[in-house]
Amino acid sequence: MNRESVVFAISGMMFGLLVGWILGTQQGTVVMPVSASATQSAQSPATPAAPPLDVQRAADLERQANQEPANASVRVDLGNLYFDAERYDLATSWYEAALQIDPKDVNASTDLAVSYYSQNQIDRALEQFDRSLAIDPTHTKTLLNQGIVRAFGKQDLVGATESWEHLVAIAPNSPEAARAKEALAAVQANHAATAPAGGGGGADR
């Protein structure tokens, strides 16, 4: 999995389901937080399964990490390896270890947040995204992920829209902005479709 697009593993079906999800919330349907595993299980059968863990590679990297206690990069590599195998608990531990050494690694910080989200630790994920944005306020992957977790983890569509609109404003031609535009278009289309006839003049919430 490409680390720069790690969010796509989580968001693959979400944008396709966004309109129905919004409609369900507006009709009072109870919506549970969506974990990565739940999302992936709903994807098309053509979607490839997570690769099996490369046990030898993991052992080699862990040996290197033990020999090099100040090496943040090898710990990130371990986090990536375990994340790709959907071993999110182990990925979390190694990203946290990497950030203890290099707390300014924005990619590791955001990958840690996604790992929290993948374990349904919604608030921890959002807190970690805030830390990522404190490091780099323009980090596109963080903003896209933040919107996804706000929408699907907290049912906060207003907050999600804020994240995605900011992303589009600062990096309109990025791959992450393309995903954000899809989500925003779905939000806007559904808002128009469900607006009361004649425009009752009420303020948007």
Image (cartoon, rainbow, N blue to C red):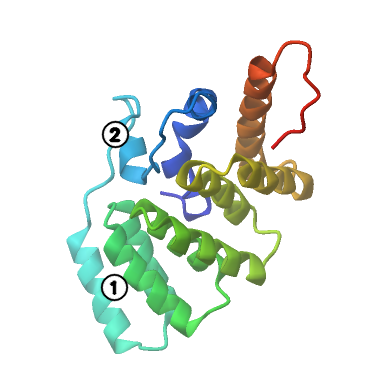
For mark 1, give the secondary structure. Answer: helix
Disc marking residue 61? 1
Q: Is residue 60 left or right of residue 177?
A: left
- Looking at the figure, which quarter contains the C terminus? top right
**Residue 74 visible in this rendered orientation of the protein:** no
Is disc 1 surrounded by few (<14), some (14 to 19) or many (20+) residues within 10 Å?
some
Is disc 2 surrounded by few (<14), some (14 to 19) or many (20+) residues within 10 Å?
few
In the image, is residue 118 above or below residue 78? above
Give the residue displayed 34% in from the left and 24% down from the top.
44
Residue 154 position in % (x across, y down): 49, 47
Q: Is residue 4 left or right of residue 32?
A: right
Give the residue displayed 35% in from the left and 72% down from the top.
94
The residue singled out by tag 2 in the image is 41
Q: Residue furthest top?
A: 197
Which is more toward the observer, 129 or 27? 27
Give the residue displayed 34% in from the left and 30% down from the top.
47
In the image, is residue 13 above or below residue 78? above
Which is more toward the observer, 166 or 87? 166
Q: In the image, which is nearer the foreground, mark 1 or mark 2?
A: 2
Q: Is residue 25 left or right of residue 1?
A: right
Residue 55 position in % (x across, y down): 18, 62
For mark 2, give the secondary structure. Answer: helix
Q: Earlier in the sequence, mark 1 or mark 2?
A: 2
